[in-house]
Image (cartoon, rainbow, N blue to C red):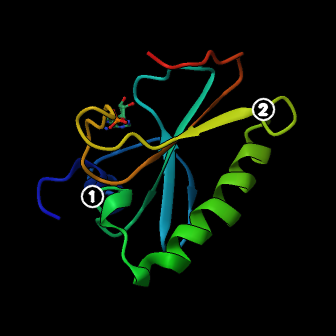
Amino acid sequence: MADCIFCKIAQKEIPSNLVYEDDQVVAFKDLEPQAPVHVLIIPKKHVESVLAFTKEDKDLAAHILVDVIPQLARELGVDEKGFRVVTNTGDEGGQSVKHLHFHLLGGRSLQWPPG
Ligand code: AMP
C-alpha cells in the first residue's frame, strides 16, 4: 500500500534491520527498542490490524503464531526465560503504524499491566 512504512520495509524500499524473512512474513528490529529483544513481525501483504484479517488470512495468521514467533523466540534466546507478544490495535490500543505488526519483547522482566 502506498505510503505505508511497513509495506516499504517489507518490499525493501526502505532499510531495516531484518531478522527473519519468508514468502509471507518479515521480522525486523524495532527502531526504538523497549527491551533488549524487541522485534516486529509483519505480514508482507498490507493488513491494517487483526480486525482486518479475513477467513482467507487464517493460514497466514497461523503461520505467524505457530511457526514464526516461536522460531524467533528461540533464535533470539528468550524462549526459556519468557517474552511477550503484543499487537496494539487502534487508537486506544496504541497502534501508531496502521500495518499489522506483532511486537516480540523480551530479555528483561516485563511488568503488567502495561501503561
Ligand atoms: P505501534 O505503536 O504498536 O504501532 O508500534 C509501531 C512500532 O514501530 C514502534 O515501536 C516504533 O518504534 C516502530 N517503528 C516505526 N518505524 C520503524 C522503522 N522504520 N523501523 C523499525 N521500527 C519502526
Instruction: Note whether ligand 1 is within 8 Å of mark 1.
Output: no
Instruction: Note whether ligand 1 is within 8 Å of mark 2.
Output: no
Mark 1 or mark 2, which has the lower sequence index? 1
The residue singled out by tag 1 in the image is: 48
In this view, the residue in front, 90 or 28, is 90
Q: Quadrant of residue 73?
A: top right
- Quadrant in which the N terminus appears: bottom left
The residue singled out by tag 2 in the image is: 82
The residue located at (49%, 58%) in the rendering is: 26
Q: Secondary structure at mark 1?
A: loop
Q: Residue 85: percent from the left, percent from the top?
A: 59, 41
Q: How many marks?
A: 2
Amino acid at dot 2: Gly
Q: Residue 17: percent from the left, percent from the top?
A: 48, 41
Outermost residue toward the right in this view = 80
In this view, the residue in front, 85 or 114, is 114
Q: Residues within 10 Å of mark 1 (few under 14, many from 20)?
A: some
Q: Quadrant of residue 12?
A: bottom left
- Quadrant in which the C terminus appears: top left
Q: Which quadrant of the picture is home to ligand 1? A: top left
